[in-house]
Amino acid sequence: MNVKLLILLVLLPFQALAQGFAGLGSEAGDFAQPERGHVLTFPEDHGAHPAFRIEWWYMTANLKGADGRDYGLQWTLFRSALAPVDGQGWETPQVYMGHAAVTTPEAHFVAERLARGGIGQAGVTASPFAAWIDEWALMGPDFDHLTMRAQGSDFGYDVALTAKGPLVLQGDRGYSFKSASGQASHYYSQPFFDLTGTLTLPEGEVAVTGQAWFDHEWSSQPLAEDQTGWDWFSLSFDTGDKLMGFVLRGESDYTSATWIAADGTATPLPNGAFQAEPVEQTGLPTTWRVTLAEQGLDVTVTALNPGAWMTTSVPYWEGPVTITGSHQGRGYLEMTGRGD
């Protein structure tokens, strides 16, 4: 196949995201739709769901080097379907995009991979779990014990992850509302990974330890027509408790959140309970005030590196944050559809 044609076919389903992410609000057509009440089952649901239009496997991690320096790490595999049918080899409608990043207080390293599914270059299997694109891989004998690696022209990482808590089903037992009009996804997390391994940076190798948060989400129309992007927070507090919350920006903002106790007990929260307001009023907001009255939470969330812009085919901001105020901790922030 012509290389330019291959690149076009890979990029085509992601172009809507590049248009302010509003394309995710387009009609689902004949693609499958999430069903409320559908019971997620594992390990099967760790794998791909090719009947749905869009899916992602997403790992972020807050790390420290032996000298106490802070780092952030990201590994993401996106799947997008050109059609609501599956196929073999070059006839498969599944295409993949991989993003990897390492963030330091002074620098943000980014790499991207693009691939067609069905030919072995990229894919996901449920058991044993493996998600890969080229030589980048997230895999293991079971989902509690994984290894993860990726590299770009000026960075890389090779790390091991061990789950220390249960999977968390977001929303209503894994059915996550995205708008008042009913758009939704299937969504679960594993926010309890311990991580050890090595970063490779221009200055050399760095041994790191820390905690990682994994998200897996699939849908065919995850946004309403008027929604242009989201601000998503994964916050881990020194108490062991955690919070996932997001604001979907539209004519009327829509919020959703889950409070995750240290033992893994998850409490979903309705639209409006989670509040996130930028502290800066100009430019890209990398300092936020986040509140959750039910838990007495009132914190300032500050980017480790305000320049953590993902300069990829689908641009967005993603980076590690620190948490101060009523609760202390670390986490990750993602902002989409805000422009560069």
Image (cartoon, helix red, strand yellow):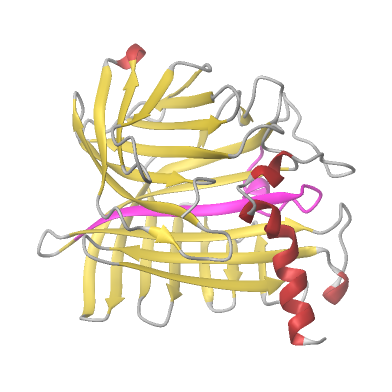
Q: Position of residue 156 (x, y in %)?
A: 37, 75
Residue 289 seen in the figure: yes
Q: Is residue 51 magenta?
A: yes
Locate residue 26: give its quadrant: top right
Q: Is residue 23 magenta?
A: no
Image: 334 above or below 203 = above
Question: Depth check: 190 or 122 in front?
Answer: 122
Question: Depth check: 24 or 97 in front?
Answer: 24
Q: Name the residue rendered at 57%, 46% in the picture.
A: 216
Q: Position of residue 271 (x, y in %)?
A: 53, 18
Q: Is residue 222 left or right of residue 196?
A: right
Q: Is residue 40 left or right of residue 216?
A: right
Image: 282 above or below 325 = below
Q: Is residue 54 left or right of residue 98?
A: right
Q: Position of residue 79 (x, y in %)?
A: 68, 58
Q: Quadrant of the N terminus?
A: bottom right
List the single residue furthest toward the left.
67
Image: 248 above or below 24 = above
Image: 215 above or below 177 = below
List the single residue furthest toward the front.
282
Q: Position of residue 174 (x, y in %)?
A: 61, 31
Q: Name the residue rendered at 60%, 23% in the picture.
A: 172
Residue 117 seen in the figure: no
| Residues in magenta, as a range | 40-64
List the single residue furthest toward the bottom.
2
